[in-house]
Amino acid sequence: MSILVQKYGGSSVADEQKIQQVAERVVAAKRQGRDLVVVVSAMGKTTDQLLAQARRIHPDPPRRELDMLTSVGERISMALLSMAIQRLGFDAISFTGSQSGIITNDRHSDARIIEVRPFRLQDELCRGRIVIVAGFQGMSYRREITTLGRGGSDTTAVALAAALGAECEIYGDVDGVYSADPKVVREARHIPGLGYPEMQELAEHGARVLNAAAVEFAKERDIAIFVKRTDGQGSQTVVRRFSPAAPGQVVGLAHERSVRVVATQGEGRDALLAFLDERGIPGKQLSVYRFRDAPEGVGAAVVVSREFLEDAAPFRVALEERFGAHAFLDAELGAVSLIGAGINQSFRALRRALGVLAEAGIEPAGLHTSSFRITALVPGARLDEAVSRLHRAFIEERGAPEDAC
Amino acid sequence: MSILVQKYGGSSVADEQKIQQVAERVVAAKRQGRDLVVVVSAMGKTTDQLLAQARRIHPDPPRRELDMLTSVGERISMALLSMAIQRLGFDAISFTGSQSGIITNDRHSDARIIEVRPFRLQDELCRGRIVIVAGFQGMSYRREITTLGRGGSDTTAVALAAALGAECEIYGDVDGVYSADPKVVREARHIPGLGYPEMQELAEHGARVLNAAAVEFAKERDIAIFVKRTDGQGSQTVVRRFSPAAPGQVVGLAHERSVRVVATQGEGRDALLAFLDERGIPGKQLSVYRFRDAPEGVGAAVVVSREFLEDAAPFRVALEERFGAHAFLDAELGAVSLIGAGINQSFRALRRALGVLAEAGIEPAGLHTSSFRITALVPGARLDEAVSRLHRAFIEERGAPEDAC
C-alpha cells in the first residue's frame, strides 16, 4: 500500500469552487493508484473570524473553549471536501482530529502531538476510501478537544505521514520555498531542496510556506516534505535531512512584518517573564541590548510576534500598572533574518549585513544570531527595503559559497 | 441537587449580544441555587447556511458528511456561551453531544437518541460548574457524529432532563404556545397548559415552538416541559401528561405554509413509495383522494413537507422519467389543522370546519383526520384566510366545550 498524505491550506479551500478543484486533484492522485489521506485547514479566514468573535465576547477567552470553537473551521472544510469527492464518484470519508487518533498533551490552543493512533484511517484506506482529516486539532488524553496552534495542519499532515509510513505533500499558494517572499523581493529564487534546520529557521522567522513545528516533527521521524502549489503548476521544494547547500551559504531570507519588544530596566527581568507567562505570551528571543528610545540602563528585552500581541493597548496599560516607567513596549519593528547552516562560524556574514544596512542608512534596533541565522530588527517602515538590499547582497550577487562566510 | 435544564433556540443566540443576554439569564438562575445544564442551538441561520453550502457542492450531500458539517453550528454557540458566562465570573464548561453521552442510532441527519450517559455532565455539576451542551447532535454506537434532525436541540434538552432527573425549560421568541401563530392570527390566545398528544399534533403540523420528537421523548419519560420567552417576559406554557382541556375542545390551530402532494394513478402506489424512500423523503400522510387537477382515477397520494422537497425541479423530472403521466407533483398547497383530543368522536367539528371554509369559497384539496386532528389542504394563497376564519369559529367564538364537538 503506497500511502500519500496531502495537506491543503486555508487559501486552497477558501471557497466552494476551490474545494471542488482540490477534489479533482485528489481524485487524479487516486486514479494513479495512491492511497490518499487528505488533511485540510479551515476555509480562508474562518479561524480568524471565529477568534475575533470570541474576543468580542471575552477579552481573554478561556483556551479550552477557544479550542472547542476554532476546531469547527477544519470540520467544515473536511465535510465539504468529502462531499465534493463523492460528487466525483469516488468513495470518501472524513474524520475529526480525535477520530483520526491524533492524541495531544492538554496545552489548549497550542497542543503538541504526543501519539498518533490512525487505526480508523487505516481501516478506511483498506476499504479503498479516500480519507479526509481535519487538520490543526487533536484530542488530549483527558478526552478534550485541543488545537495545535497556528499552521498546525502542517503538523497534522507530517504526524500522520510518519504514523502511516507515507509521503507528505503540503499544498499552498506557491510552488515551494523561495529565497525571500516573492511579494517583497521580485528577484526571489526558487529553492529546490532544503535541510530541516534551515526550513525551521525560515518558518520560525516569518516564512509562511510551512509550519516550524511540522518541520520539527518531520525531522524527528525523518519524513521528507514536498512543498507544492495547489494547482500543480511550477516546481516544488523538498525538505529533508540533508541540505544541498554548502556550509556558510545563505539559503534564504525570512522576515516578520511586525514584532514588538517588551523591555525592563534593571532588576525587572524575572517579573517581566512572569508577567508575559500570565498572559500566555511566548517570547521569540530574550536578550540584553539597548534601544535608542529606551531609558538609560537596559535590563531584559523580549521579542514578541505580533500574533500574540494583536491588541497592544490593554497590554500597555497593564505593563505600566505593574512596572511603572521601568518597563516599556516599543514601537512596531520589522525583523529580517538571513538563514544558512554555519553562517556564524565567523562574523563575516554579520559584518557584511551590517554594512549593507548602513549603506542604506538603516540602523538595526537589535541583532540576534544563532548557528543558522542572523536577525536584525529594523524600523517597520524600512523593512521591505532591508529585505531587498540583503537579498541582493547575499543571494543575487553571491559568488561561490566560500565567499559568503 | 436540584438540576434545571434550559434550552435556548437559534434566535435566542443569534448574535453576540444575545449570547451575552442568555449568559446573564443563566447566571441569574445559578445565583438562585440551581445546578444548570444549558442546551444551545446553532446561532440564527448558521445551519441553513451550512446546508446551502453543502448543496452547492453536492446536489444530494451524503448524510454522514452532512452531520459532520452541520454539527459545528451548535459547537460555535456552546463555546461562545461558555466564554460569555466565564466573562461574568462564573465557572462554565461546554460539551459536544458525544462528550455529553448522547448516544443515538446511526440514521444520519435524523438520528434517534437511544441512550444518555451524562457522566461527565454530572461530574462537572458536582464541581459547581455550569454545563453547556451542544444541542441537535449525538454519537452513534459506531462512534460517528450524528444529528437529530430539525429542532433536535429540544430533544437533547428533554433527553438530558430525563437522564438527570431535572426540570426542562425551552426558551424561544414567544412566551409559550398559542392557539394559532400570532403572526397570522392577531387574536391568537395564550395556552397555559397542554397535554403531550395535543402538543405533538401541533408541532407535527406546523407549530414551531416545540419539536414533536422532543414531546414524544418527554411523554415516554413523563418530563414536564416549560415553554418560555428568552427574556423572561410574558407567561409560559406547561406541557405535561394531563391536558387541562375538555374532551372534544379544539385547543389550537397549526398550519404549514407549504406542503406538496405526490400522487400516482392506478397501480403505482408501491412504486411511488419506493421512489420516495430512495430519495429519503418521508411522507406525512398517505391516502387516497381526488384532486381537481388530477387525471381521472386516482391511486395513492402522499403529503410531503416542503423541507424535504426544497428543490422540486429535479424531483419532478425524475418523477416523470419513472412514471410518465401516471404520477404528478401538485402545485404548492397550505395545510391548516385543528387540534384537540376527541374532536373526531363525531363529524360535527369536521362539518363545521367545512362550512366555515365553504362560506369563504375555499374548497379543500384534501382532508385528513386523526383522533386529535382535522387537517385541510387549501390553496397556498388562501391559507392565512383559512387559518383566521377557523380560529374565529373554533377559538374566539366557542362556547362551552360541549358545543364544539
Image (cartoon, coloured by chain):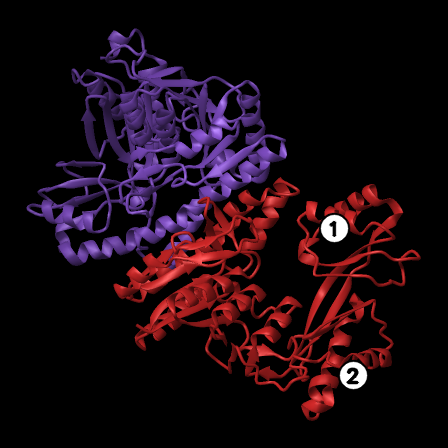
Chain colours: A purple, B red
Image spot of residue B282 (x, y percent): 68, 55
Rendered image: mark on residue A162:
none
Q: In the image shown, does B221 or B245 lie closer to the viewer? A: B221
**In the displayed structure image, the side of residue B7 where residue A151 appears, left or right:** left
Q: Which residue is mark 1?
A: B273
Which numbered circle lies on residue B348? Answer: 2
Q: Residue furthest right?
A: B296
Residue closer to the observer: B8 or B224: B224
Q: Quadrant of the C terminus of chain B?
A: bottom right
Residue drawn at (41%, 59%) of the image: B133
Give the residue at the far left of this rendering.
Answer: A267
On the picture, is A380 further left or further right than A45? left
Mark sitting earlier along the chain (2/1): 1
Query: In this orientation, does residue A205 appear?
Result: no
Q: Position of residue A273 (x, y in %)?
A: 15, 45
Q: Chain of mark 2?
A: B
Going by the numbered disc 1, the residue's amino acid type is Leu
Of helix, strand and loop, which one carries label 1? helix
Query: From the viewer's perspective, is A144 left or right of B290?
Result: left
Residue at left offset 32%, top offset 34%: A256
Residue type for callout 2:
Arg
Local crowd size for mark 2, using a 10 Å CA cut-off: few (<14), some (14–19), many (≥20)? some
Distance CA(mark 2)–CA(mark 1): 33 Å
Task: Name the quadrant containing residue A90.
Answer: top right
Residue A385 in sight in this render: yes
Q: Quadrant of residue A298?
A: top left
Name the foreground residue: A136 vs A191.
A136
Left or right: residue A253 compared with residue A75: left
Q: Chain of mark 1?
A: B
Which quadrant would residue A109 be assigned to in this image?
A: top left
A288 shown above or below A356: below
